[in-house]
Amino acid sequence: MALDEEALAPPFLETAGLVLRRFTEADVDLLIELDSDPDVMRFITGGTPTSREEIENEVLPAFISYYERFDGYGFWAAIERETGGFIGWFHLRPDPTTTSEDPELGYRLRSAAWGKGYATEGARALIDKAFRELGANRVVASTMAVNIASRRVMEKAGLRFVKVYYPEWLLSIDGGADGGVEYAVDKADWDAVRTTDRNTTETDVQ
């Protein structure tokens, strides 16, 4: 399903391949379609889709509420620049167990958008924004230990492995017995990554 998403809400962040914008109430069907793919939901619910009722009454209102509660933090619809199509979402939000100085990064993309580098591209852009504009000290992210693809995205985005943990809710999902993993990067390490990236780029150009 394709909409003129950029007309629905102004861009929050733009990269070479993506436009991230706020969610609106018109995005219900886009979220339903995203969460109806069992491959997308495999490491979240075990493949069970999210119901329309839950998206309309809980998920989307929660997404939208972030824009009023936090300046610069929230959930962002990811639009593929080339096609103008919705490919999923990213979030950068205060972790309820920590503070806004240690926001949590997350993403959920359509399976058709996998393997194109969008998850890494969006994640890196949000991490950079967190440190350069939002005053973050540390950015964290987590996934199931068996979700190798998501772990690779975190590593490519500049986050590093911190720990394994074992929340009870994971036990109901195939592979959950292996636990979840946390990754993180602090501002000093991120500045070092960016310096390396710049030096590499300059060397390639010369």
Image (cartoon, rainbow, N blue to C red):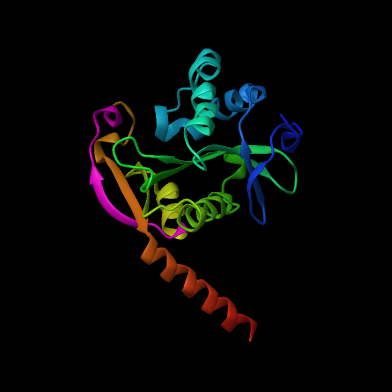
Q: Could you say which is closer to the camera, residue 60 or residue 99? A: 99
| Quarter containing the N terminus | top right
The spot of residue 39 in percent (x, y) is 50, 34
Is-magenta flag for residue 20? no
Which residues make up the magenta segment? 157-171
Most extreme residue toward the top is: 53
Query: Which x, y percent locates residue 25?
Result: 63, 22
The residue at the point 42 percent across, 64 percent down is 190
Towards the viewer: 3 or 132? 132
Quarter in which the C terminus is drawn: bottom right
What residue do we see at 55% from left, 16% from top?
Answer: 56
- Residue at the image point whose x is 30% and y is 41% from the top: 98
Q: Position of residue 53 (x, y in %)?
A: 53, 12
Q: Quadrant of residue 162?
A: bottom left
Total marks shown come to: 0
Residue 113 coordinates in the image, percent (x, y): 61, 44
Q: Quadrant of residue 42?
A: top left
| Image point (52%, 30%), residue name | 68
Left or right relative to 7: residue 79: left
- Taking the image as shown, residue 50 lies to the left or right of residue 34, namely left
* Residue 158: in magenta span: yes
Nearer to the camera, 82 or 71:
71
Q: Is residue 183 left or right of residue 71?
A: left
Q: Residue furthest bottom?
A: 206
Is 77 on the left-hand or right-hand side of 84?
Answer: left
